[in-house]
Image (tube, coloured by chain):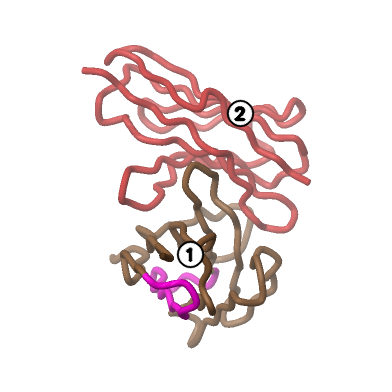
Amino acid sequence: KQEVTQIPAALSVPEGENLVLNCSFTDSAIYNLQWFRQDPGKGLTSLLLIQSSQREQTSGRLNASLDKSSGRSTLYIAASQPGDSATYLCAVRDSNYQLIWGAGTKLIIKP
Amino acid sequence: GAGVSQSPSNKVTEKGKDVELRCDPISGHTALYWYRQSLGQGLEFLIYFQGNSAPDKSGLPSDRFSAERTGGSVSTLTIQRTQQEDSAVYLCASSYWDTNTDTQYFGPGTRLTVL
């Protein structure tokens, strides 16, 4: 059974710092991996989707990597801003076409 | 264009009552998903629709939960005889087609509280 783990559960950093969020999964038979952000009272916003054949994806200040063989993904946020404060969720799409979710990392960027 | 919408945004009900949660997907999206997010926990897959059919109902926690989709568009998640453990945020998502390349777009969710 696929399990997704995100570390750390919470992170607080000063504005301007670069940071890395981690996601690990137990079964490497995935179709893709997605990173989402969730703001309080709002739905989930997809940030990046990495296909199983890809190694990384970039969007603006965000870069996500995927190492399928080791069951790991990282989300790198450059030059963090207070508006980046949110909960970041990692999800893998497995062979049953379900998204299996991590519990998230709550990120706080201090001005 | 409009995103995924859900109604109501909040629902408070008494234990034992039935509730209906509604999801309007993005127009043209054929795949629709329901998830549940309990306090302090990750999202839990409930059910998936392709068109009006539900090829995967494996996530429904009990037979008190059911869902339908009509006209390949609106979906309703029904919870009968609600219990306190049903309290959670229920999220709906849609995607254009069920392939491994499609991003799921999420609605704002319905927060259900069972007293």
The chain letter for the residue carrying disc 2 is A
- Answer left or right for B89 relative to A34: left
Which residue is painted at 52% across and 29% down in the image? A64
Q: Secondary structure at mark 2?
A: strand
Is residue A58 one of those drawn in magenta?
Answer: no
The residue segment tinted magenta is B13-31
Tell me the kind of residue under disc 2.
Ser
The image quarter containing residue B8 is bottom left
Q: Nearer the viewer, residue A61 or B80?
A: B80
The image quarter containing residue B80 is bottom right
Q: Nearer the viewer, residue B41 or A53?
A: B41
Query: Which color has been applied to chain A in this rendered view?
Result: red
Which residue is painted at 49% across and 56% down in the image? B104
The chain letter for the residue carrying disc 1 is B
* Residue that mark 1 sits on: B94
Q: Position of residue B86 (x, y in %)?
A: 52, 63
Q: Are marks 2 and 1 in contact (CB under 8 Å)?
A: no
- Residue B115 sits above or below residue A29 on the image: below
Q: Residues within 10 Å of mark 1 (few under 14, many from 20)?
A: many
Q: Position of residue A77 (x, y in %)?
A: 41, 23
* Residue that mark 2 sits on: A73
- Answer left or right for A51 relative to A88: right
- Answer left or right for B52 relative to B89: right
Is residue B26 one of those drawn in magenta?
Answer: yes
Query: Which color has been applied to chain B in this rendered view?
Result: brown
Tell me the kind of residue under disc 1.
Ser
